[in-house]
Amino acid sequence: GEPIPTQRLLDGLEGRVSATLCDSVQNMEIKNRYSVLTDYPGYICGRAKRGFTCSATGLAVAAIQRCLDSWDGDTNQVGLVIAATNSADRPLPCLGFELLAGLPGRLPDDANVLNMQNMGCSSLIKALDVARMFVALNPGKKAVVVAVEAITGLAERLVANHYRSFKETRRMSDQADMARERRNTQRFLFAMLFGDAAVAFVLGGSRREGLLGFGPAVHATNLRPADTDILRMNEGGIHMPILEEFPFYEMSDEVPQRGAAYASEILARLSRRYRLDNDVEKGILPKFDFYNIHTGSKKILNGVFRTLDVDPLGSQARESLDVLSRCANTATCSAGLMLAQRSAAPARDGVGLLLAFGVGFSASAAIVGAL
């Protein structure tokens, strides 16, 4: 569909959002997003019914079809299919199994299917790393990796009389009122933060046949035990199986600071493991030609760039900021959209860092590019 401007969402709420909260949204630097909902602005603002232009599975099927159509290889060589998402159409069957049903004859039904669901924003890099190992161990075989998000389908109508920033809610004296208003703020930010997308890859073992190389990867999960709760969605599990309406996505104030810490740690691990040209012990991190980094806002992204000593206004940061601005936070898909933008560029030489972190709390990073 057409891109949906952030300003259109704010205008539709007709003054029900405080100036401070509006400024916070503008500072995210998310200009547009796409949605699987028929009329996302109308639905969010309480004027339109909830309807879908397509499903998450349908979006993933379309991405795989486009990917295979642009590849001149033999699909019978595909031995592994990995499907990653945080917003599947339904809990069971998982996305990967539905994809093979939606692509009869295009993907071999004897391929190993691996589902990576509800693993947060770093799961695409984890999936690509698993696929890389598979094709290395199985010469002549290929792997298909697809990520899809239809997160706007989890957004709630914004029907409260007024929405305030977290800073404004902290001034409230009544604890119950403050808790209610903070939940409203979280719901509002969810509606502004996310967008929908799908991205698919074919991975092979030969460097000569690819647009981009995917090299060594490292991972870090829950460096601090309490990190597991800084991003969470509790409803829908066995402890809270019945949903009255929508699951509630909660984000701690610690996310920017912890995200920057994970970015620094994951790059240090990459340096130590693969002996990149730097002195990690002295705090000197390696330099790359480009940085494809997924985060949920420009504020967090700038914090990561400061940690890595990268100029956010320079060409090294271009894809990271462009994808955030054009597509919003597409969770699992963001890193893939950055790679797609770089692979389509006239000059795509160089070696870069691909990095994402999120729910888990978990981070993954890989070396990508002209390897």
Image: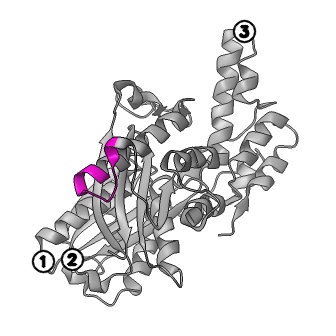
Q: CA distance from mark 1 to mark 3?
A: 64 Å
Q: Is residue 45 left or right of residue 154?
A: right
Instruction: Report the span colored magenta.
Output: 271-281
State the residue in front, 85 or 304.
304
Q: What's the amino acid at mark 2?
A: Gly
Q: Is residue 179 left or right of residue 87?
A: right
Q: What's the amino acid at mark 1?
A: Pro
Evaluate whether residue 249 shows in this view.
no
Q: Picture coordinates of residue 296 (x, y %)?
A: 57, 47
In the rendered structure, which disc, 2 or 3, sits on the residue that comes first in sequence?
3
108 over 12 or under it: above or below: below
Q: Picture coordinates of residue 107 (x, y %)?
A: 27, 76
285 over 134 or under it: above or below: above
Task: Report the residue marked by disc 1.
Answer: 139
In the rendered structure, which disc, 1 or 3, sits on the residue that comes first in sequence?
1
Task: Report the residue marked by disc 3.
Answer: 174
Whether label 1 touches label 2, CB < 8 Å: yes
**Residue 367 falls in which quadrant of the image?**
bottom left
Evaluate whether residue 341 shows in this view.
yes
Q: What's the amino acid at mark 3?
A: Asp
Q: Magenta stretch: residue 274 in it?
A: yes
Q: Secondary structure at mark 1?
A: loop
